[in-house]
Amino acid sequence: MKGPQVSIMVSDLTMRFPVYGVDAKSLKKSLATVTVGGRLGSSLTGATEVTALSGVNIKLKAGDRLGLIGHNGSGKTTLLRALSGAYEPDEGQIEIHGKIASLLDLNLGIDASATGYDNIRLRGRIAGLTAREIEDKLEEIGDFTGLGPFLAMPLKTYSAGMQARLAFAVATAVEADVLLMDEWIAVGDAQFQKIAHARLLSLMERAGILVLASHDIDLIRLYCNKVMVMKGGVASAVTSVKNLDDLLADA
Amino acid sequence: MQTSEHMLRTGRRGAVHEFGMAFADLKASTKRIDLAWSLAWHDIVSRYRGSILGPFWITLSMGLMVLGMGFLYAEIFKVPIQEYMPFVALGIVFWGVIVGVITEGCDTFVHASGMLSQTSLPMFTFVWRTVLRNLITLAHHLVIVVVVLIWFGYWKVSNIPMALLGLALLMLNVSWVSMAVGIASARFRDVPQIVGSIMQFAMFMTPIFWQPGRMSGGRGHALLVLNPFFHMIDGIRTPLMGGQSGSGTYPVLALLALLGWLGAFSAFALTRRRIVHYL
């Protein structure tokens, strides 16, 4: 492959969410505001803006494994979604070189009444594999899930842990340069944790960059070499994981 | 480690930039049209999973409707059955496509919220998904068209190329409507209901069950000339039955498609970065 190095550059990223309440979603209410001559401006759209991220700067190169720490609602998932390309920045810029695989939601593209194999195919397609690539990898992915005969059964018969196995197997089957993960990796039983751990390590060797959001400090220590603490949409500087204790003491 | 993939996301940089990004989305979706196809096919399979006839159930019920209405209204209108039955059959089948693409368009983005909020899949992929899904359904219903045209002997006079042109223009038009109502429904949850009512109203205003020739002034009647759905149906039905569509039919449809896409695409370009937050 020719091209620039795998990297993530985030500069002054600000994300504001318009929150469209139930009221705002009704056309009648919007029309009423116009006809009744309600105040123009923000009240017209009825959307309250929430600043989810403000002025976030990140610079990562191949080999960096960034752990995101922060309370619920501190902006971790928003940041991951922005990095996945789903959310457009309101200000600032995100530039990523490399194929991105996002493992944010277990239920992405899951059809509960379809079989395990069909779900592997569907998720694989969404993740960017061609039909042929999936057929080639189907057996390997199937083996990795360890679900055996259950793969021919509808997904609704699976437990949450089994679903996690399937999702994880497909998501990590994509040869990605940048891996974005929310902390659901912690699901699954001990045996699966072990295989998943091995797979993540090999993936990290191959892939350039990992961004992992988690509340689990041990998990962060295990996988990451850099950390960033988020608080109310404001991010600390990216520092080495060695400074984690100091950071947590400050927070 | 080197890579050829590149993603750049920035804040608003003016209308030109927004249109550029919208074009990039469109281009990416055509490159991955096979994904839209997989999703559409998956929709059909999962909708009819466990049923023996699958989409042919709809074909069957449509066929029954064609039979019933064909006999009944041929009698009421005092029209020969070999003229009325194919007329109503073609009308019902192609009206089904129009309604399908437009009403299902309301769910295009709403149903894709999971994928839109955590991947960088092109948004147009989901528009094509809706369109392709309805094309697959139409392919099933073509059985009715073929049977009726052969049974009543129209296949000898059918002008297939003209009908295909008509179908292409119909799809071009309903797809921009589909995308426009998709965006509107994501923002305002009343829109699907409004669209549903309008389409039902339009069904009665469009010559599907009644023949345009029965209007005073025939095809020139204002209610027909001003009804875009009439032109869409007429552009397919008339050539299939060996007739000549009005001279204005295809130019009007082409113009409508052009203007419609300009409008719908502009709306998309301006709302694109907001759509995911509407959901």
Image (cartoon, rainbow, N blue to C red):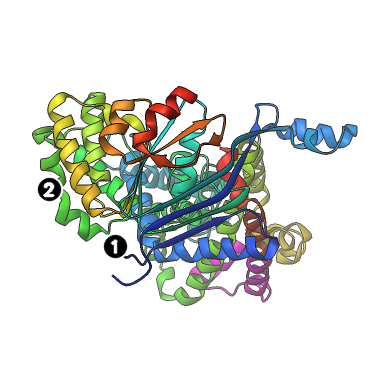
Magenta segment includes B232: yes
Q: Position of residue B203 (x, y in %)?
A: 62, 47
Question: Which residue is drawn at the image coordinates 66% and 34% (left, top)?
Answer: B190
On screen, A156 above or below B118?
above
Looking at the image, which is closer to me, A134 or B33? A134
Q: Are marks 1 and 2 on the same chain?
A: no
On screen, A119 above or below A3?
above
Looking at the image, which is closer to me, B164 or A10? A10
Task: Name the image quarter holding residue A48.
Answer: top right
Question: Which residue is drawn at the image coordinates 76% and 30% (left, top)?
Answer: A29
Q: Position of residue B277 (x, y in %)?
A: 58, 40
- Residue A112 visible? The answer is no
Q: CA distance from mark 1 to mark 2?
A: 25 Å
Which residue is tagged 2? Answer: A140
The chain to which mark 1 is attached is B
Of the two numbered discs 1 and 2 in the rendering, the one whose residue sits closer to the viewer? 1
The span shown in magenta is: B229-258
Does dot 1 land on a helix, a strand or a loop? loop
Task: Name the image quarter holding residue B19.
Answer: bottom right
